[in-house]
Amino acid sequence: MIGQIVDTNSAWLGNELTLLGIDVKRILSIPDKEADIHKALDLARLDSDLILMTGGLGPTKDDITKKALAAYVGSEFYFDQPLADRIAAFFERRGIPFLEAHRQQCYMPRAATSLKNEMGTAPGMLFQKDGKLLLSMPGVPYEMKWIFSNSFLPELAKLRKPDSHIYHRTIKTVGMGESRIAESIHDILDTFPPYITMSFLPSLGSVKLRLTAKHAEDKSAEVESLVIKIAEKIPKLIYGYDFTTIGEALRDVFVEKNLKLSTAESCTGGYLAHQLTTVPGSSKFYHGSIIAYDYAPKKSLLGVSPATLENHGAVSEETVKEMLSGVLEKFGTDLGVAISGIAGPGGGMPDKPVGTIWMAYGTKEDIRTYKLQLTKDRLKNIQYTSMAAMNALRKFVLGF
């Protein structure tokens, strides 16, 4: 409520519910006050069949969700001895004492169906009131996700009878904004039947195109046919589908062609290397990085000429080309990328304003350069540059 915590739970749940064909009516953030919880539940029950809540199930005094829910449905508490035994064993394995606060956590509303939580101590609680389902889960994201996926969905399947087939397909693109993409494929969009819709979901440097079919019959084949037509229109922009990341797409093209990669970073400070190494299997193609933030390591580690730095500066086409040659020599990889720029918010000059980023990528024999002119937002500049670098390498290997 005060901005110190970002609500990632709602985003995750919204996506999961959409994939299930459940329309999300609203998302509310409310304080830890019983009256506010009751008001939010009254509002949600007006037009929703399913209400999901996260947070407030811990052992501390500020965790009042369970008490508020019991009062809302008019339920008394009972002591759940099996839950107490499980929590005590959970703590014993970790050498943590079982406190009175933990014992109090084991009092559960009789009206609730307890949902198993193998990632923590607080179980989920499923209530039914006036034909509406109310699910309360811990706020810790990995606990919430486990309960939703493993304990709640089987219960939901028993209660819910879908009246239509839902099919989603997401095309992942990079390198062009949503308006230009829409213009490129407008003739295909005009052929969509009413039961198939397209959503444009832009983010930093990329756009997701989500096709959704809702029909009494299975229309997945029809969606796939439209996906193929779109792919034929914008092949260079598409790096994957559904849950594929740009890093995974880059890994796949490098591994397929048995190529090795190294990176040299200045203004991105290792963020590109971080993005690459979060990808499972990155060791199959990625050898490492040199983070040369200052002039000294650019010269000593990457072999950038002092004259180049003196005459052209660190943020220049000439410098990134020499950085690339240096990192390819140092690691002996097939391909590399080098980045140097002014991430901001300060440090700009009249001829090189904040957001000026130079990039060199390719092989020893084929070095290509690319200049980005971005914003004054430091983090966004770093993130966008890393995305652009991965896409440039992907297109280089694919011959685009």
Image (cartoon, helix red, strand yellow):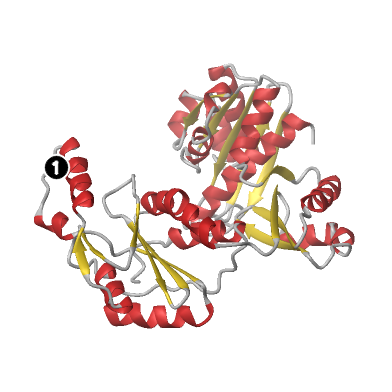
The residue indicated by pointer 1 is: 96
Left or right placement of residue 198 versus residue 230 in this view: left
- 374 w.r.t. 241: above or below: below
Q: Position of residue 17 (x, y in %)?
A: 55, 60
Q: Position of residue 121 (x, y in %)?
A: 26, 50
Count of numbered circles in the view: 1
Q: In this view of the protein, can residue 342 be seen by the observer?
A: no
User: In front: 95, or 231?
Assistant: 95
User: In front: 98, or 345?
Assistant: 98
Q: Residue at x 31, y 73 (%)?
A: 69
Question: Residue type at mark 1?
Answer: Ile
Left or right placement of residue 259 versus residue 345 in this view: right
Q: In this view of the protein, can residue 141 be seen by the observer?
A: yes
Q: Position of residue 294 (x, y in %)?
A: 44, 36
Q: Quadrant of residue 43?
A: bottom left
Q: Residue at x 61, y 24 (%)?
A: 325
Q: Quadrant of residue 135?
A: bottom left
Q: Quadrant of residue 18?
A: bottom right
Quadrant housing the N terminus: bottom left
Quadrant housing the C terminus: top right
User: In front: 250, or 292?
Assistant: 250
- 262 w.r.t. 247: above or below: above
**SS at mark 1 in the image:** loop
- 97 w.r.t. 322: above or below: below
User: In front: 278, or 128?
Assistant: 128
Q: Residue at x 69, y 38 (%)?
A: 392
Left or right placement of residue 132 versus residue 219 in this view: left
Q: Position of residue 85 (x, y in %)?
A: 18, 46
